[in-house]
Image: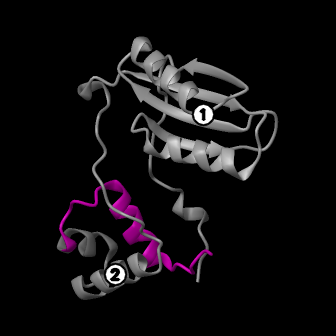
Amino acid sequence: MAFALDAIDRNILSELQVDSSRSLDEIAKKVGASKTATWNRIRKLRENGTILRQNAVLDPDKLGLESCFFVLIRTSEHDKTWQDRFLSVIRERPEVLEAHRLAGDIDYLLKVRVANAKAYDVFYQSLIKEVKLFNVTSLLSMEEIKNTTMLPLEHSQTG
């Protein structure tokens, strides 16, 4: 459920998306509200689940994780037992940055970050050993053109 956001809430969220490590004073000044009002709004946004968590965004290349693969998975299994096992395996794998269940010909899409093609093959071999898959297509990203965690707040619900 979307919560009604006013302009100040959206401005606070925008500032937090840019850099949540800034001080409360800096954020309050940027959004034109008092420190107390800003803090109360941030607390409310956390309590209602609009702000899920705050974390650092790391550079994968500097950490030696230079290869990004998109993995398209088709399965012939659609029962709850298989799905529970598959989801458990995917959630446990740190290489999997994103996992989506899709409508259409492909059942699942994974975004996998590893050091290189050899590391991807280790991931792939482990995955197919742990869970039965019908078809897997792996696509290597040659260039990352855009990567953001910033949501488009101008389209969010208003109060």
Task: Point out the stretch of residues depicted in magenta.
Answer: 1-24
- Frontmost of labels 2 and 1 is 1
Secondary structure, mark 1, is loop
Q: Quadrant of residue 13?
A: bottom left
Residue denoted by label 1:
131
Say what amino acid the circle numbered 1 marks. Val
Point 56% across, 42% down: residue: 99
Residue lying at 65% horizontally and 21% vertically, measured from the top left: 137
Q: Give the residue at mark 2.
A: 43
For label 1, count other residues whose C-alpha is less than 10 Å away and answer few (under 14), some (14-19) or many (20+).
some
When the figure is inspected, residue 151 is found, relative to residue 103, above or below; the finding is below
> What type is the residue that disc 2 sits on?
Arg
User: Can you give x and y, in whole percent of width and height, for residue 49 in the image?
Assistant: 47, 74
Please, what secondary structure does the residue beneath circle 2 have? helix
Mark before the other along the chain sequence, 2 or 1: 2
Total number of numbered discs in the rendering: 2
Q: Eyeballing the image, is 137 above or below 118?
A: below
Q: Is residue 86 left or right of residue 27?
A: right
How packed is label 2: few (under 14 Cα within 10 Å), some, or many (20 or more)? few
Q: Residue at x 39, y 18 (%)?
A: 119
Residue at (44% x, 13% y) in the render? 117
